[in-house]
Image: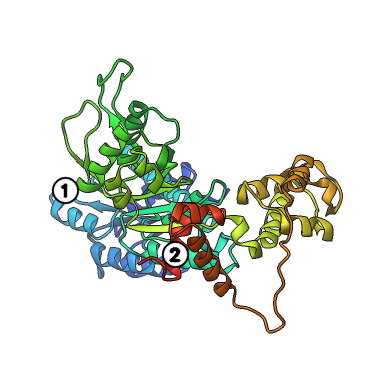
Amino acid sequence: MRKPKILVVDDEHLIRWSLEQSLVKQGYDVTTAANGEDALQFIQEESPELVLLDIQLPGLDGLEVLEKVKEIDEDILVIMVTALGVLETAVKAMRMGAYDYINKPFNLDELSIIIKKALDTKELRKEVAHLRSTQTSKYGIENIIGNSRHMQQVLEMVRKVAKSDASTVLIQGESGTGKELIARAIHFESSRRDKPFMAINCAAMPETLLESELMGHEKGAFTDAKAQKKGLFEIADGGTLFLDEIGDMDVGMQAKLLRILEERTFRRIGGTKEIPVDVRIVSATNQELLKKIEEKSFRNDLYYRLQVIPIYLPSLRERPDDIMPLVDFFIEHYNREFGKTVKGISKMARKFLEEYEWPGNVRELRNIIERAIILESEETLMLEHLPGEMVSRAGESGSGPMNLRIPPEGIDIEDVERELIRQSLEIAEGNQSKAAKKLNLGIDAFRYRMKKFGFLT
């Protein structure tokens, strides 16, 4: 393991010698310099982790050297060594980027503690930066498989939303379409990427428990509150809070959430202090919220507050062009994870996957590829390697291509979609819910298309 490099800069030979002897015994790689010019030359060539820098130097003084060090590499730690009575200069050095300062005459044990703390902090910062870089790479928009026109439109919206100041985003789509993946992409493509991304599933969670998770509580707020607890709003300050299955949130909790969105402050349970918060709220649901509003189980005012920026995530049935790219991606992914060497799938299996209805969407596709790669040892996935219940279910439902013919001159798919929307409205005599059912679409997805083709303004 490489020893951390430390540069000692002081014009007094005895101090340089004593510091070098002490630090070498502690396992550091130590170099010394008697003036600022020599120090800067060494820093340019060797880039040490830490510099012990005397403020009073001949030629360039310590503050001038500090300024140039930060220009060379702002990540180099600098601890200023000062004489008594120059506290103002030490404070100025801290403002210029010095990590800490110590007064002469100094205690070697005390200096050793400061150096270790500084190097530990730097290592922690490197680890955090690496983790953030890994997360950004993992959840960035470039990792979302979406070659189809529908998904390209979604990804373009994600790019715009991520760069905007939008405080609320509502993602709608069937279960398994990847709503959390889109939420994470919005976060990691935004300026909030260095702040926390926190997620919670609102489904089937009692109001009291959800309120405690979101807002936290004070010590003694209720029987089991033995200590103060910060909630997700507080933890995610400056970042993003993802509220999955928002449609299942209790009506009472909806009112409290609306207040937070409007006021941008909240109180912990049992607390009296208003805590300001800057959080982007990304919500997701697979339910028809407009229908829930009609049923009085979802607040109308909260719906319109959440869907300032709406994103509709299409089902896998609506984006068949993405099926095979997703298959290839999952095969590569699980090959790496399980040490397998599957090279692809047979023509028959491919045809089945392309014609299957995918009620579980991308999640179902991912699960069957994972299962097949775990259980099978052949290089090619065959139709018989797919789950038997999946194949039989497809047969029972009559899954397969419709008996449609494309004219020789070709046809615009958008014209077909527009005509289907028009006909369904005509058959349903303008009733949007009935028209949506004719096309096996949710009401939100149907209204999206109505608006797209000019049937709804």
* Mark 1 vs mark 2: in front: 2
Where disc 2 sits, the SS reads helix
Which quadrant does the C terminus fall into?
bottom left
Q: Is residue 397 left or right of residue 203?
A: right
Q: Is residue 295 left or right of residue 337?
A: left
Q: Callout 1 environment at 10 Å: few (<14), some (14 to 19), or many (20+)?
A: few
Q: Callout 2 environment at 10 Å: few (<14), some (14 to 19), or many (20+)?
A: some
Alpha-carbon span between mark 1 and mark 2: 76 Å
| Residue 351 location (% of width, % of height) | 78, 59
Determine if residue 134 is in view.
no
Query: Residue at the spot x=26%, y=52% of the render?
Result: 81
Q: Which residue is mark 2?
A: 450
Residue lying at the far top in this picture: please name it.
223
Q: Amino acid at mark 2?
A: Met
Where disc 1 sits, the SS reads loop
Query: Residue at the spot x=38%, y=65% of the render?
Result: 456
| Residue 72 location (% of width, % of height) | 38, 68
Q: Which residue is mark 1?
A: 84
Residue 455, above or below 222: below
User: For this rendering, which residue is in front, 11 or 375?
Assistant: 375
Q: Amino acid at mark 1?
A: Leu
| Residue 189 location (% of width, % of height) | 43, 61
